[in-house]
Amino acid sequence: MYDRDGSSGAASRSRAASGSGAAGGSGAPPDAGHGSGDGHGSGDGRPATPRGTGGADGAPVPGGSTIYDVARRAGVGIATVSRALRGSAPVAEATRARVLAAVAELDFRPSHLGTSLAERRHAANGIVFPDLSGPYYAEVLLGYEEAASRLGRSVLVMATRGRPDAVSAVRDLADRVDGLVVLGRTVPDDVLAALAATLPVVLVARPALDGTDAIRTAGRATAGALAEHLAAHGIRRARFLGSPDASPDAADRWRGARDAFDRFDVGLPVVDCRFDEASGRAAAHAVLSGNAGPDALVCANDEIALGAVQAAEDLGLRVGRDIAITGWDDVMAARHARPALTTVRQPMRTLGALAAEVLDERITGARTTPRLETLPTELVVRASCGSHP
């Protein structure tokens, strides 16, 4: 399934998928079942066992104690030790005092990984993309990783395209992370709703579900402004290249442009295609090769539009004179195309960064109610739609 909510692609620099389908992110915690030779395991793959830390005379070795030693000394479980030290949940004052006394006596120095394991936390977030190629996803992932790193979290990245059982892969990823960000319609709504019942889930570029947070960019109004601009150029036979049924964001863009064109008695039929450059080129070839073809191609994203520009050139049409072509996203190639591409700029990197921040709020308990955000977009007029009236 390919569905980018109106844009396609992803980070080519993302980690390669492995095993269960999630790629190791930056600094992901090691598998707790592997021996490391550091005293928590044998170093040869045998299961790790709690170790004592006494010296030759039975005194604790400074800085060598474990969370298990503290738990035994205080007479509590390791989860209680972790909560007492982190303040992540209520602990009785008498219990907290025993834990702190044991910490002082044993000179315990907690590790981030140890307390995370004690609380069954992973210190990692998961992010699920429909695909992992192209500039849109690269920008979103870059923003997400930068914010997650700043928040002290590693990132596991997954793409669902081409997976025979994407639902199982996403469920497996959910078992390995503290929270999940999902872009577009990568898995069915009922699966996401079930995950959100037990795990913080943030949806990006699609409407919210019960119990989830959601972050989108404004589509309809800006698409309407784009259509009005084209109508002012005298456009009367427009087509929309993309797949509104596959993408909530693409659907918003099509509806916004269609409704605005309606006021000028201009229709906007859909030419269904995927959200990549090759699909845009093929779709544009088909629609521009017929008699009385369109005088404008309104594309669901810049990649489709750049493919449409190539198709127009293949057919000897002058973009900006014989045919107007517009995109959406304002990726770097749109600015440097010739003619430069009229498009709608959306804050792709901010979209990813905000998703990481919103997810962290839910994981840490800083916020328990859903947060719904819509980021602004901006019409960017360039030469691909012709001389400005």
Image: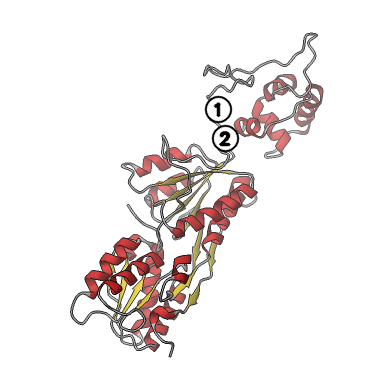
Viewer-nearest residue: 4 or 292: 292
Looking at the picture, which amino acid does disc 1 mark?
Ala
Viewer-nearest residue: 186 or 370: 186
Give the secondary structure at mark 1.
loop
Label drawn at residue 29? 2
In x, y percent, where is residue 57? 80, 9
Q: Residue at x 68, y 31 (%)?
A: 111
Q: Residue at x 78, y 33 (%)?
A: 93
Q: How many marks?
A: 2
Q: Is residue 162 left or right of residue 292?
A: right
Outermost residue toward the left in this view = 291
Give the secondary structure at mark 2.
loop
Disc 1 packing (10 Å; few <14; some 14–19; many ≥20):
some
Looking at the picture, which amino acid does disc 2 mark?
Pro
Give the Cα separation between the discs numbered 1 and 2: 8 Å
From the viewer's perspective, is residue 267 above or below residue 55? below
In x, y percent, where is residue 306? 37, 68
Viewer-nearest residue: 83 or 35: 35
In x, y percent, where is residue 350? 56, 61
Q: Is residue 321 left or right of residue 37?
A: left
Give the quarter of the image for residue 32: top right
In x, y percent, where is residue 162? 32, 46
From the viewer's perspective, is residue 154 above or below residue 62? below
Q: Which residue position holds label 1?
A: 32
Viewer-nearest residue: 276 or 317: 317
